[in-house]
Image (tube, rainbow, N blue to C red):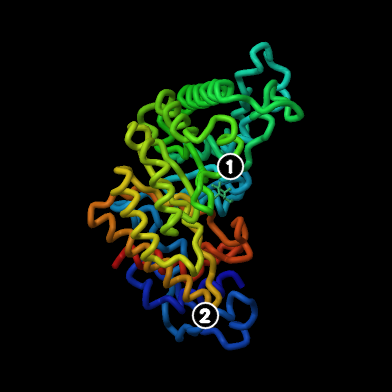
Amino acid sequence: MKKRTIALVCAAVMGLTMASCGPKVSTPQEDASTQAASSNETDVTTTPQEGEQHPSPEDCEALKDLYKDYFDIGTCISATMIKNKTYYDFILKNFSSVTCENNMKPEAMMNRYETQHGDMTDGGTRIVLNMENMRKELDFASQNGLKMRGHVFVWHEQTPDWIFYVNFDPEGELAGRELMLTRLENYMKDVFSWVEENYPGLFYAWDIANECMGDNNKMRDSLWYKTIGEDYVEQVFALARKYAPDYIKLFYNDYNESVPAKRTAIIKMLKPVAEAGNLDGMGMQAHLNSTNTVKSVVDSVRIYEKELGVTVHITELDYAQPKSADPETAQAQYYGQLFKELKALKDEGVAIESVTFWGINDGLSWRKDENPLLFNKDMTPKKAYYAVIDAAKN
Ligand code: GLA
């Protein structure tokens, strides 16, 4: 069944792909009843002709190699993913950059018990960290020569509330600005020194702050904002600059970043950070759907680079399968167009360095109901996969 699905999808996109993949595999002709055997198969509109040859993903060039003259190609990873041999091999073949999906988020690296039982004489200035949760992913990357994006220091989600309170007591009083700045400074210092000691050179970029702009185009009223004040983003980046090894680029990261009003607000918020020399990159999450045109995404890359004078990474790419008569083809067209235009941007001299997918297949995706990635949950390729391959060639 798996092979047959691959063959049918390959056939549908063969015109696009024949030039892009290596040794080809012959496929028997399929009849209409086998095409209707699964929902994935019913999307396929072209039946392969007898004698036609179709590439399988194993025979296609690696995504990272196809785009090596343009940008790194990345994915998020989890410890569970890399325990699976199929995913492990697939990631090593196709990607040059990885990001921890969850294990470098604040809640994964902060130890509540140890912190609350630590020295409280000054209200507690040090959050005790547990860096072991991220070990498996960091070992995987460092042992296999992958680069990593760090994700994420300061965010309103997946961050425990108790870090914002005097004595780390969430029943008590909110911490004031000076106390939170000291905690932040210790947090930055401790994370970067651990990373530098244990994995020197592994990280090339780090999302220092995530989603600080609200969808109302005003700074999000998070506990970071409440405790430190409206310059907290500037403070966070100044501390990151002080403690990060100089080979790690400091990024701001956000979603709905291609919506013009939010983009303008993000740029306004980041200007002082950039002017202080503390911002190296803009992370465009690119959680996309049919309301986001390719043009709006590509224009945004250009605008962030120009307005802030920084490099741009696409950090969490996924595009919901649009509602249309042939959603899989429509999705493939979008991905193909997007990658062609990102390449063209690079040819123009725009500093886009890295494009990371937020996962490797629809079943593992946080948006699994929207089928937003290049592979089905059984790792059979979708048309979008071949469209991305084809865009590299044209
Ligand atoms: C945001 C975060 C990611 C991830 C997604 C949902 O985009 O930056 O780390 O949590 O939400 O999975």
Q: Is residue 360 above or below residue 101?
A: below
Q: Percent position (x, y) of residue 333?
A: 42, 72
Q: Is residue 243 visible?
A: yes
Q: Nearer the viewer, residue 212 or 345?
A: 212
Indicate the amino acid at tag 2.
Asp
Q: Would you call the spot at circle 1 few (<14 residues within 10 Å), some (14-19), or many (20 or more)?
A: some
Which residue was labeled with disc 1?
221
Ligand 1 contact, mark 1 (Cβ < 8 Å): no
- Viewed as shown, does residue 361 lie left or right of 196? right
* Mark sitting on residue 358: none
Q: Nearer the viewer, residue 290 or 267?
A: 267
Quadrant that contains the C terminus: bottom left
Which residue was labeled with disc 2?
326
Q: Is residue 123 above or below residue 318?
A: above
Quadrant that contains the N terminus: bottom right
Distance from label 1 to label 2 (Cα)? 41 Å
- Most extreme residue toward the left is 348
